[in-house]
Image (spheres, coloured by chain):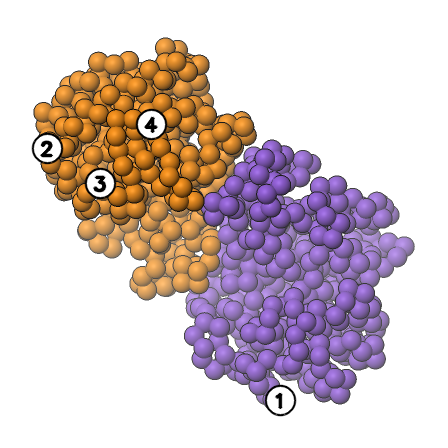
Chain colours: A purple, B orange
Amino acid sequence: MYRNFGFKIIYQSEEKSRVGEITTPHGKIKTPAFIFCGTKASVKGISPQQLIENKTQIILSNTYHLFSYPGSEHIKNRGGLHKFLGWNGPMFTDSGGFQIFSLGHGSVADEIKGRRSGISTLSKINEEGAFFKSYWDGSEQLLTPEKSIKVQCDLGADLIVAFDECTPYHSDKKYTEKSMERSHRWEKRSLDEFLRRNDFTQALYGIVQGGIYADFRKRSAEFVSSHPFFATAIGGTLGSTKEQMYEVVEMAMNGLDISRPIHLLGIGGIADIFRGVRLGIDTFDCVHPTRIARHGGALVKAAFRDSTSREHINLKRSEYNEDDNPIETDCDCSTCKIFSRAYLHYLLKAKELLAIQAIAVHNIRFMNRLMEEIRDGIFEEKLDEVERKWR
Amino acid sequence: MYRNFGFKIIYQSEEKSRVGEITTPHGKIKTPAFIFCGTKASVKGISPQQLIENKTQIILSNTYHLFSYPGSEHIKNRGGLHKFLGWNGPMFTDSGGFQIFSLGHGSVADEIKGRRSGISTLSKINEEGAFFKSYWDGSEQLLTPEKSIKVQCDLGADLIVAFDECTPYHSDKKYTEKSMERSHRWEKRSLDEFLRRNDFTQALYGIVQGGIYADFRKRSAEFVSSHPFFATAIGGTLGSTKEQMYEVVEMAMNGLDISRPIHLLGIGGIADIFRGVRLGIDTFDCVHPTRIARHGGALVKAAFRDSTSREHINLKRSEYNEDDNPIETDCDCSTCKIFSRAYLHYLLKAKELLAIQAIAVHNIRFMNRLMEEIRDGIFEEKLDEVERKWR
């Protein structure tokens, strides 16, 4: 059923980390890999050419946003997402569930990290699906498992995801279980709809839910593994602290079929990626690298930081006003080859658009180099050394 | 005194148009050429790499803006403008005068086209120089001929311009003459200061003023031609209609030393460029191609227009919602190779940053192709044919 897709583990380390390769109709993805967010069918401020120049393997778009505007049928009529946005490599879309439950109630990061409570009042949920207000025009919309799959088929990304409820962090155990069980029924309906529509151009991910509860995470992992999904995504609340996040991911990994690719949704910090890789995660996605670029944040390796508490430098800070060095002296991106920190600082202060593009280019190349070195590190059994350099 | 600079006329047509080549320490410029505006040390939203990919020969920055922030000494300390903004080709800076007299009172285009009246209340002028308020922090500043040249030396562009007053359109003949005579004294002081500082890395343009009066334009042209400027810029009020503009340019051309390169300040429409070229103009500059890009305006040749009154299409218009064609089917820019009008329309509607970059890339390539074909057209004595295609 996934005849144009494949996943092979090229090297399994002595620990759980592994180097692999996902095959899609639009090319192969070497794993561990980072997926860049082109939320609204565009990686903000970056052209497909720049993505390729900086060795990007795969990007994603968000079903929620594109469903609201311009609508999936519009994109289907334009030839699908790949053609629409001019990206001929592998693409991923999510199910839309995550945004429905997190938008309007703080950022996605807030929700993952448990800083907000309650289910969005913007939506109501019943067995059929989730009602929400369109971010585009405020109209009331309903997304169901069948609709999410239909929309994702219209969009035509290579890798698509079953529809689930993203259970909020502050839910109690009882609600979390009820929500997880409904997500399983929704995932089953997603799978049925996918199979009905399957034309072998797309492959479906199941999602592990279960909140912060070990027994639920295991049960959810077993549910997903026992159904013919192509791959697995770990979703939902990952806890309120970094340590809890790693515990939750580890819980989810128990009971998972590790012969399938495993994606960790919405995580993209450097330290987090190393922890995830060591737990056996193959792919990550996060808005972080491109979002911080828009606020002057440039990702840097340990040697180039100005603080031990952050993985990036804030180029708006006055200390960079006369800093003639590039963001990183050892970076091969076009930004580091041409621009100084002083110039980028100036562009940010002068509110020149180029700042966003230039810093985003660096952050994209940074993430892709990080993943390259992680793959090499696993293969050569020297991941500790790679981690000391990057983390 | 301009030993690292040169200008040769490669082909003089039977009319006044000509193909030439300006030599600078940072490379040669084939003329007729278009100079793109990197007002605040950045062509808005476009990287130097993208400028090169789209065959850009030369860019300019504005002394007024950089004087206000970050200051010319800061840029000098960073290694000069070329190094600061990462552009290793020819550069041009203006004197700062134009902005002082036009900002705060409508756009530069308004001022040129005579749509606003009066001298900016933001500045006062006396024999010493012009007082103005910094756009950056509102502080009172004084720019004199000596200061303008000092600032332009700090910045280090190849081609720099004498300091003048940009006489407003609505000035009467008496004021225009008084202003022009003061501009001549300022230009002489600019030249003296330039000669005092000359290190053979820069070349100075004189400016022809004189408003809409033929006798003044001729007198000003003779003034400039009788002083050892490297080249000539035609500045100030060019009239209130297109026809008047061409008349004023023609007046200025009378009495000019045409063995020097001739620049027409602030003009960049397609029809205007053809008229200017036919009057013997070698270089043009205008914010137009990159400014309209920020509002969804894509320059197109006659065959691709949706209106006879405009030289661009507005991609925000709903008629492009389902238009799967590129901006121009015969354009070789990266935007036209990858993106449809429908996608660009969507990006504009969704307020995605990429729209600006993508349309600006097209407009830059468009202008550079236009100038390439104009040069070929002059050389092959078929400028009429080129004009029918582009205008």
| Image quarter hosting the N terminus of chain A | bottom right
Q: Which residue is mark 4?
A: B144
- Asked if residue B341 lies left or right of residue A45, the reply is left
- Asked if one can make out residue A247 in the rendered structure from this viewpoint, the answer is yes
Q: Amino acid at mark 3?
A: Ile
What amino acid does circle 4 point to? Thr
Task: Name the one closer to the observer, B79 or B340.
Answer: B79
The type of residue carrying mark 2 is: Lys
Circle number at residue B119: 3
Q: Is residue B285 visible?
A: no
Q: Residues within 10 Å of mark 2 (few under 14, many from 20)?
A: some
Question: Circle 1 marks a residue in which chain?
Answer: A
Give the percent coordinates (x, y) of residue B386: 24, 35
Q: Are marks 1 and 2 on the same chain?
A: no
Task: Give the mark, 2 or 3, whose residue is nearer the N terminus.
Answer: 3
Gap in angstroms between the C-alphas marked 2 and 4: 24 Å
- Identify the mark nearer the N-term, 4 or 3: 3
- The chain containing the residue under callout 3 comes to B
As drawn, the label of residue A127 is 1
Mark 3 is surrounded, within 10 Å at the Cα level, by few (under 14), some (14 to 19) or many (20 or more) other residues, namely some
